[in-house]
Every structure is written in structure tokens, then in C-alpha cells.
Amino acid sequence: MLQTELVLNRLEPLKLALPIFLSPTRTRVLAALDDLGTQPKEYPKLYADSFAASLRAAINDDPIEGWEIQGPSNCLHMRDKETHLKLRFLKEFAYEGDVPPAGNNQARITAWVQEPLMDVEATGKRPLKDVRLVLVWKERNGLFDCTVYQAETAGDFPKGAKARAVMQIPITPNLNNTSFNPDTSDEEHIVPKKNIVIREASKETVTS
């Protein structure tokens, strides 16, 4: 199978599962913020972080077929068990472009600057172990949208990283489902606009 085809194949379980997870996650997070007397528009970072944490917990309780959660609990990173394809879940960049710049985060720099996917035969025991993708989520009026990208450059704040779209995932919420069913045919989309970019003098840091 070609490398590009294999990537799309391994992303398919995520494409099926995300519509089931997103709306219930949003409901839980909004309820929690309401208990705290806070609103997403007033505290976008709190909302985004809470959404990622709640989504991570939901996936951990009801795993997506073939994928496993990795990394620290303050972010949502996943890996395909078979090919070792890696995926980061990030909210839409608040400035120019969808994918945030890598900043001074060395792990991100490594993940952002990589060889592009090609129409060549995928080989080896873990054929996608060096491929790192970014799933960018957006939310508009309670509706989600997400796109899987492969970053091509590190970016330079306030400009996001140059990236190539790998898969577009329009999401139609299915509120009747509460767990992942591989036979589901729903489609999907995801979260908030504010990004966690911190500038200190001439330094720029991007978290998670």
C-alpha cells in the first residue's frame, strides 16, 4: 500500500469515532465551567484545556480501535498501534493559519519539520513511525469541524506553520451514541479559537 493511502486507512477509526465523542465532551465541559461561574468566551484557554482533558478521558475510557493515548495528561497525543503514526490534537491557531507555530518547543519543532508524505510504497514493520500529523479542531456556534494536517515548516509567530491538509473531517453530531461503534457512518468536526501562545520579550513559547 502507498504511504499516503496507508495514512488515510489508519485515520479511518478516528473519522468514525470523533462525532460520537465531541458533542458529549462539549456538554460536560460547559456544565463544569458553568458550575465555576465562567464562560468559554471569557476564558477561552480554560475552555480549550478542559475540552482536551475531557476528550482525552473519554477516549481513555472508550478507546478508539487501533489507537492509544500517549504523552502527558495536559495534552492529547495519540499513536496508531500498528504503524506508529502519531497524531496531536490542537485547537485552531488564533492568528494566521490553522496550525500553530512550533515556537521554542523542541518536540514540536521535530514534529513540524519532516519529510512530506509521498505516493511511495510503505515499507518496514512500523511504516509510519516517522510521520507526525496534527488534528486541528474548530468550533462555531456549538458545531465542530476538524482537519488533519502534516506540518511542513516550524512557522513564525504570528504566522502559523505551513501545512498540507491530509484529511477533512466534517462532523455531524450524533447525540444518540455515547460510545464508539466501528460500524457507525457518522462524520465529524472539533473546538476553540484561542491558542496558547506566550510571548516574553523576544522569546516565544507554545505550550503542548
Image (spheres, rainbow, N blue to C red):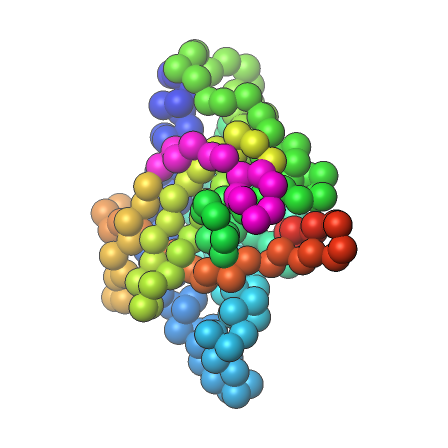
Position of residue 132 measured from the top left corner of the image (x, y, whole percent): 55, 33
User: What kind of secondary structure does the magenta stretch mostly adopt?
Assistant: loop
The spot of residue 71 in percent (x, y) is 65, 48
Q: Nearer the viewer, residue 5 or 201?
A: 201
- 103 to the left or right of 83: right
**Residue in the foreground of this view, choosing between 39 and 18:** 39
Percent position (x, y) of residue 116?
Answer: 49, 22
For the question of whether residue 203 can be seen, the reply is yes
In the rendered structure, does residue 160 fall within the stretch colored magenta?
yes
State whether residue 206 is above or below residue 11.
below
198 lies above or below 121 = below
Number of numbered labels in the structure image = 0
Which quarter of the picture shows residue 11? top left
The residue drawn where x is 29% and y is 53% is: 171
Query: Residue at the spot x=46%, y=45% of the render?
Result: 97
135 above or below 131?
A: below
Residue at (54% x, 15% y) in the render: 124
Query: Residue 147 falls in which quadrant of the image?
Result: top left
* Residue 153 place in picture, x, y as percent: 56, 32
Q: Which quarter of the figure is the N terminus placed in? A: top left
- The answer to whether one can see residue 181 in this image is no
Q: Is residue 171 magenta?
A: no
Q: In percent of the image, x 75 and y 50: which residue is there? A: 202
In the depicted structure, whether residue 167 falls above or below residue 92: above
Magenta residues span 155-167
Taking the view exactly as shown, the residue that stands out farthest to the front is: 201
